[in-house]
Amino acid sequence: MYRTHDEPHDGTGRIHPTSGAPLLAARELRKTYARTPALDGASFAIRTGEVVAIMGPSGSGKSTLLHCLAGIIRPDTGTIDYQGRDLATMPDAARSALRRDAFGFVFQFGQLVPELSCLENVALPLRLAGVRRGDAHRTAREWLARLEVDDVGDQRPGEVSGGQGQRVAVARALVTSPRVVFADEPTGALDSLNGERVMRLLTDTARSGDTAVVLVTHESRVAAYSDREVIVRDGRVYDAAVAQ
Ligand code: ADP
C-alpha cells in the first residue's frame, strides 16, 4: 500500500524520506476548476540534481501539479516553497522573473518559435535575460552541440525532424542553466528510439549541471530515466519511495 505525502511518516512533518532540504517543495495543494477538483491535497518535493517522474492516469492532475510547481498557475490553497519563497502567494511579476531566471520548460511538441532558426530559438532565453547577441549565439551553439543537433542551427523548426526539434527544445530549456526543468510529456510525439535519445540527453545534461527535472509522463520507459517516481491519482500524490 502506498502512503500519502500528507500523512507524515516520521512524525516530523517531512514529506520526503531522504535527508537535506528540498529545492522545491509543495504542500497540500488544492485546485478546483469550476466544480472539478484537479488537485486534492497534493504534496511533492524535489532536490537539486534529482530527476522525478510524475505518473498517473489521464485527468489525474499531473499537468495541474506541474503548472503549480512551475509558478504558471496558483493553487487555491497550499504552499510551494522555492528557496524560502512561496510561489503560491508571490506577485505575478516575481513569478515571471523566477520562471525566466531559474526554470526551464520542455513541452510535448517542443513549441519552438517557427519564424526563428533553431539557433535563435536556443539563444532566445539568453537574449530575454539581456545577454548580447554574439555571446548568446555562441552559448546557444555550444548547447546545440551538447544535444547533438549542431547541424540544424540555421534551419527553422519546420525543417527539422521531430526528434531534432525536441533536442533543440531541450537545449533551449537548459541554456540558462536553470535550477529546475519542467518537462510535460517531452517524448510524447516521438518514436521510441528518438524518445530515448531525448530522455538520455535531457537527464544526463541536467544531472551534470545539478539541474532538477520534474517530468510528467504516462510511459514507464520514459520514467525509467528518473531517480524516483511519484503517482498522481484523483489529485493526490503517492510516492513510490515511501511505499509501505
Ligand atoms: P493530467 O495531466 O493528469 O491529464 P490535468 O491536470 O490536466 O490531468 O487535469 C486534472 C483535472 O482537471 C481533469 O479533470 C481536467 O479536466 C481538469 N482541468 C485541468 N485544467 C483545466 C482547465 N484549465 N479548466 C477546466 N478544467 C481543467
Image (cartoon, helix red, strand yellow):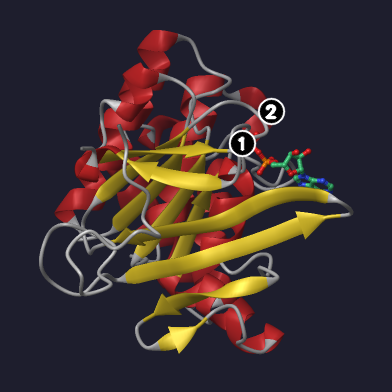
Q: Earlier in the sequence, mark 2 or mark 1?
A: 1
User: Which is more toward the observer, 223 or 209?
Assistant: 223
Q: Which residue is mark 2?
A: 158
Which corner quadrant holds the C terminus? Answer: top left
Q: Are marks 2 and 1 in contact (CB under 8 Å)?
A: no
Label 1 residue near ligand 1, CB within 8 Å = yes
Left or right relative to 126: residue 147: left
Q: Quadrant of residue 76?
A: bottom right
**Residue 153 visible within the image:** no
Mark in front: 2 vs 1: 1
Tell whether 224 sits left or right of 157. left
Determine the secondary structure under disc 1: loop
Tag shown at residue 60? 1
**Image height of 129 relative to 195, above or below:** below
Q: Quadrant of ligand 1?
A: top right
Q: Is residue 169 left or right of residue 234?
A: left
Residue 6: give x, y in percent of width and height.
40, 60
Residue 31 picture location, percent across and down: 70, 60
Separation of marks 2 and 1 at Cα, in angstroms: 33 Å
Q: Amino acid at mark 1?
A: Ser
Residue type at mark 2? Gly
Which residue is drawn at the image coordinates 62% and 86% (left, top)?
89
Q: From what the image shows, is residue 85 above or below residue 226?
A: below
Pointer 2 local density, CA inside 10 Å: few below 14, some 14–19, many at least 20: some
- Residue 155: percent from left, percent from top: 59, 34
- Secondary element type, mark 2: helix
At horizontal 61% and vertical 57% (from top left) the residue drawn is: 67
Q: Quadrant of residue 238?
A: top left
Residue drawn where x is 37% and y is 49% of the image:
4
Q: Is residue 80 visible?
A: yes
Q: In this orientation, which residue lies closer to the viewer: 48 or 141?
A: 48
